[in-house]
Structures are given as structure tokens and as C-alpha cells.
Amino acid sequence: MDLGLKGKIALVTASSRGLGRAVAEELAAEGASLVLCARNTASLEKTADAIRETTGAKIITVTADVSDPAAIDSVWARARDEFGRVDILITNAGGPPAGPFESHPPSAWTDALRLNFESVVNITRAVLPGMKERRWGRIINITSIAVKQPVDNLILSNSVRAAVTGFARTLANEVAGFGVTVNCVMPGYTLTDRIADLAKANADQRGTTTDAIVGAWESQIPMGRLGTPKEFAAMVTFLASERASYTTGASIPVDGGWIRALL
């Protein structure tokens, strides 16, 4: 299947590792050029070099913390100067700390909002006018299964990623007439560093082992295993494609069946 991504320009935030890197790899394999950003320069450059070697994609990198609006401006400026546009925006950021409500001071809520909500709004604000003008665009937000079925010990993520979902669903209707789609993809328990960190946090809180925590998660998943970043990236890449032109305003799980809701 030709996804129609050859020659498209994709901006992927937090793309040096984990889900962001997997999405960048899949988009490059389909012929897209990439703008990659992350906070760690060495890790970002290593990822970019690896993707160039395997796909031949044209890639520019920008070291940036997306919770800083000035850094987002820098990412957009580099993309505009190098490619002249962004056709596909993938918003992604590491999740906020785990823990129950009373463990988080007010500053933790502010930090979570900046990292996981305001960053989405700010980077969307930068790229959307060009998408509307060209009457083609894809905005895909990486959220979490927690927006459909809250996850214990993740009150910050449960709350803030739900806000992203509300933003995306509303924006989808506003820009549909311009050929711009806006969707969210909800990763379930997936083999990333973030999941390893969450397993440790939960194990410490409950006085057990990380293996026991992972085993409990796997027992809740009908497929009986954690997902892989590549499996998640395949869904994102499809939504970024020409083939997904009539899908907008959706939140799609990639979770092995973990979410029990009908809708």
C-alpha cells in the first residue's frame, strides 16, 4: 500500500527514543523528510544518524524542550527555513511523574500542563496556518489509554492528556473543511523506557518487584503481552497518510485490547 508520504515534511517532537523515535523511523521509511526535536542532543543526533543510514531520509534536528514556548519557536523556525512547511505534526512528550494526588505539589501540575498540554497548543499554533493555506495537513497527538480508562497512580497524566483530547477533538471540527485532520493515538502498555520507569514507581509504592508489576499489566491485556513501539508507529503513520483522509476527531487505542469501553 502506497501511503502517499513521499515528499511530505513531518515534525516529530520528543523523537530521540521510545514512541517518538519509532514514529520517525516509520515516516522516514515511507519517504517523508523529518524535523526531529528532543532535549538530549547526543541521543537526538544518534537517532537521526541511524534513520538516515537505514532510509536515506533528509532530517534536521533541533535540541529543544517543548515545555518552553521559545524552544518551540526555534523548532518551527528551523523547519520553515529548511523545508518551508510542515505537512505532518506528531506531538509527543514524556509523561509527568507518577504518584497519587497528595504527592504532587502545585508546581508539578504547572510543569505537567506546560509539558503535555501547552506544548501541543503552541506547536499546533505554529504549523496550522500553513496547513490550512495548502489545504492539507495531519496533526496527530500521542496521548494515552488513560484518557479513556484512567490508570492508577497517574493522576497528572490522566488529567492533562484528557485536556489534549478535548483540544484535539474541538480543533478537528474547526479545520476539517481545510483538508486538515486532527487525531489522537492512545498507546497502551508498550515496551519503552517510560513503562520501565512506571513499573519501578509502582513497585516501590506497593513494596513489590517490577516483574510483578509488568506481569499484572500483561494479565490485564487480552493479547497477554506489552506492545512494541513499531506496532504503535504503524497506526500513527497510517493516520498521517493520504489513505486516512476521512478520519478526523478520533482517539484510537493501540493497546492489545486493554481498554474495556465499548466506545
Image (spheres, rainbow, N blue to C red):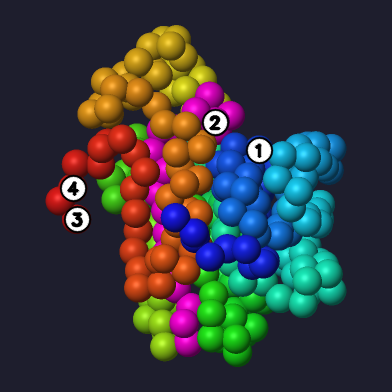
Q: Which mark is residue 261?
A: 4
Q: Residue under circle 3? A: 263
Task: Answer with the quarter of the image where residue 94 lies.
Answer: top right
Label 4: which secondary element: loop
Between residue 258 and residue 210, name the one nearer to us: 258
Asked whether residue 135 is in view, the answer is yes
Residue 36, position as x, y percentages in the image: 73, 54
Q: CA distance from mark 4 to mark 1?
A: 30 Å
Q: Are marks 3 and 4 in contact (CB under 8 Å)?
A: yes
In the image, residue 1 lies in the stretch drawn in magenta: no
Q: Are marks 2 and 1 in contact (CB under 8 Å)?
A: yes
Q: Residues within 10 Å of mark 1 (few under 14, many from 20)?
A: some
Q: Residue under circle 1? A: 17
Q: Which is closer to the viewer, label 4 or label 1?
A: 1
Q: Are marks 1 and 3 in contact (CB under 8 Å)?
A: no
Three-letter residue code for mark 1:
Arg
Q: Residue under circle 2? A: 192
Q: Locate residue 65 relative to residue 139 in the image: left or right.
A: right
Q: CA distance from mark 3 to mark 2?
A: 26 Å
Q: Locate residue 148 relative to residue 15 in the image: left or right.
A: left
Q: CA distance from mark 3 to mark 4?
A: 6 Å
Q: CA distance from mark 1 to mark 3?
A: 31 Å
Q: Residues within 10 Å of mark 3 (few under 14, many from 20)?
A: few
Residue in the picture at 71% in, 60% down: 33
> Which quarter of the image is occupied by the C terminus?
bottom left
Three-letter residue code for mark 2:
Thr
Q: CA distance from mark 2 to mark 1?
A: 8 Å
Q: Nearer the N terminus, badge 3 or badge 2? A: 2
